[in-house]
Amino acid sequence: MTDLAPLTMPAADAGTEAWSAWLTTRTTDELARARDLVEAVKAERPRRAADLLDRWNLVSVAVANALSAAGLFQQVHPDAEIREQAERAEVEGSKLVTDLSLDRELYDLMVVDDAEERVSGLDDDAERVRNFALRDFRRAGVDRDAAVRDRVRHLNERLTELGQTFQRNIRDDSTTVKVRRDQLDGLPADWVERHPWGEDGLVELTLEYPDVFPMLQFATDRDARVAVHKAFNNQGWPANDAVLVELLAVRQELATLLGYDGWAAYDAETKMIQTGEAIGSFIDKISKAAEASAIRDRDLLLDRIRQDRPDAEVLDPADSTRYLEILRRERHAVDAQEVRRYFTFERVRQGLLDVTARLFGLTWTEVHTPTWHEDVTSYDVALGERYLGRIHLDLHPRANKFNHAAQFTLTDGVVGEQLPEGVLVCNFPEGLMEHSDVVVLFHEFGHLIHHVLGGGQRWVRFAGVATEWDFVEAPSQLLEEWAWDTDVLVGFATDEAGDPIPSDLVRRMREADDFAKGMGARTQMFYAALAYRFHEDVPADGAALIALTRRLQSEYSMLVAFDDTHFYAGFGHLDGYSSGYYTYMWSLVIAKDLFSAFDPNDMFEPQVAARYRDRILVPGGRRDAADLVEDFLGRPFGFESFADWLAEPAPTEGRVPPDGR
């Protein structure tokens, strides 16, 4: 039990004034508390390092609280005034972080001779906190002269502003696509019913996932698919051209000013991969491993497309998803429209809670508590008799909301200070879901579990998802495996009559998913190469952005882009992940190795699940990720499990009859 309680928020309909006052307490007031704590440290100058670190921890808690609230509510709150207030708070908080990182007086207090009595009594965790703090001070440029520190301060403040603008231009893009009613042929009936035509006789589609992805997957009308794809891949354009050019230039200047070869080298230093050059090598290693199967499957897709469109010369994004669906249906008797009958949102959500409760020994208790929107559902989390914290699920699209899928922190868990609270922000339909949506939900929920289970830390630096950034996707990618297991799915995937999904269908779904795996890996490496090369060969203008994008796409991807699309302008990961999008595939290599410890015939084996929970998730960031993995596996992680997974068997020749026999 704990005396700590979760946050109490205003009701969704409490109004701007109430929400503004509450957000002020979570942002402006927390930043003021941090400043007061810093001034007290400077005035009292603690002699012992342990005392100084305790004070530094409280400063870090206050700053983290402010930035977490600001980061979340600028993305989810329906009130524009609250979103703008959150953006201003993020600027203020980022400025304070920069000021603290460049504060020579604080740094001098932290730097002490290890032989002195002042650092005696530090345990391993405290020493790790201290070493990280010193590293962060030095990486920030605290030991540079005043002119350099002033320039660094200016550049960091500008980066915050540019990142906000980049994301806002994507989030607030209200572009729609209008299509004729007959251009919806092939779409599921329930989807068509939710998209009535307007007075002009046309159906208006948004750029939200529940509109875009079904159109690309099911619409038989190629012109409609092309129109939707082009609109989706022009989000944030042309406004983000100038924003991105400056963002990349500022990062480059900051990194070189601090003595690094470039931004990728600076950013990689604190990750498992360690160097910028290693990013490029990793991208090429994965690309080479996937090349043969990617070319084979691309050619199979093109052959099938030419049965319908003989003049097709290349595989483009308006056809790829549609014909992947067709080949999976024809070769494996897997019809996504048939599959989706078994995945109703409400049952999937409950199934996810049941699966993770059984796997990790957790209890999820729904609580009716005020939040920012009526769509949000909240749950208290317990492990046995121990209350851990609270989660909030904001899972359906709406205007001016973050339009992808991610886990956000509301509070970090710190022993004796506050409970962990996390938020899942996604954009799923309210009715039937594609199985791919189910996989995404399991993935993102993995972050949420990591945040809560890793939230029982003394030091906020280690709370929740606090490992090196190129490991953070591994636990989420591991949890995806449970969304493909027959025994798991039959527990919640049922049709309208209550009949569970047939095991044979799940088997065929897995086989169908193996098709084009190499193509998918090459697409991911295109994204990773774009994020990396944008920071190595910094484009000078919009023309250079599109030229480098096209070159990298031709080098890594099996798809040929349309000339009038600008994918990079809506690639939100260029803000948060910067040059490190390779993270997803790096983490997947580790996730496949982690999964090798589980018995695929008994996915809930309690000893393995508990060992994984306690050795990977619960420690948060207390140890390096490689050490956590070695502790769980009993050996260092390797590439073999990933290579075995990638080397899927060649597609079945011929066609499977519609009934699957």
Image (cartoon, rainbow, N blue to C red):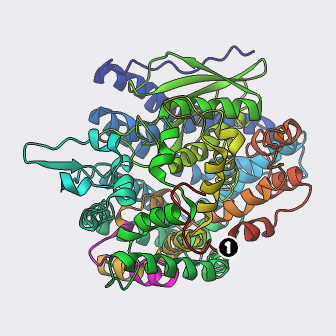
- Vertical order, 312 against 431 (above or below): below
- Judging depth in this view, the residue of 381 and 131 nearest the camera is 381
Magenta run includes residue 557: yes
Q: Is residue 145 left or right of residue 620?
A: left
Mark 1: give few (<14), some (14-19) or many (20+) Cα within 10 Å.
some
Instruction: Inspect the image, locate mark 1, and give the three-letter code of the amino acid beneath it.
Output: Thr
In the rendered structure, which segment of residues is drawn in magenta? 549-568
Residue 32 point in image, percent of width and height? 49, 32
- Judging depth in this view, the residue of 375 and 21 nearest the camera is 375
Q: Is residue 368 left or right of residue 429?
A: right
The answer to which quarter of the image holds residue 180 is: bottom left
Magenta run includes residue 520: no
Q: Which residue is mark 1?
A: 275
Q: Quadrant of the C terminus?
A: bottom right
Q: Quadrant of the N terminus?
A: top right
Number of dots carrying numbers: 1
Residue 651 point in image, percent of width and height? 61, 72
The answer to which quarter of the image holds residue 384 is: top right
Residue 122 point in image, percent of width and height? 86, 41
Disc 1 element: loop
Q: Is residue 373 left or right of residue 334?
A: left
Q: Is residue 179 left or right of residue 633?
A: left
Residue drawn at (66%, 53%) of the image: 507
Residue 53 point in image, percent of width and height? 74, 39
Residue 488 visible here? yes
Residue drawn at (39%, 37%) of the image: 76
- Vertical order, 634 against 290 (above or below): above
- Judging depth in this view, the residue of 252 and 280 nearest the camera is 280
Residue 143 visible here? no
Residue drawn at (69%, 72%) of the image: 649
- Vertical order, 29 against 461 (above or below): above
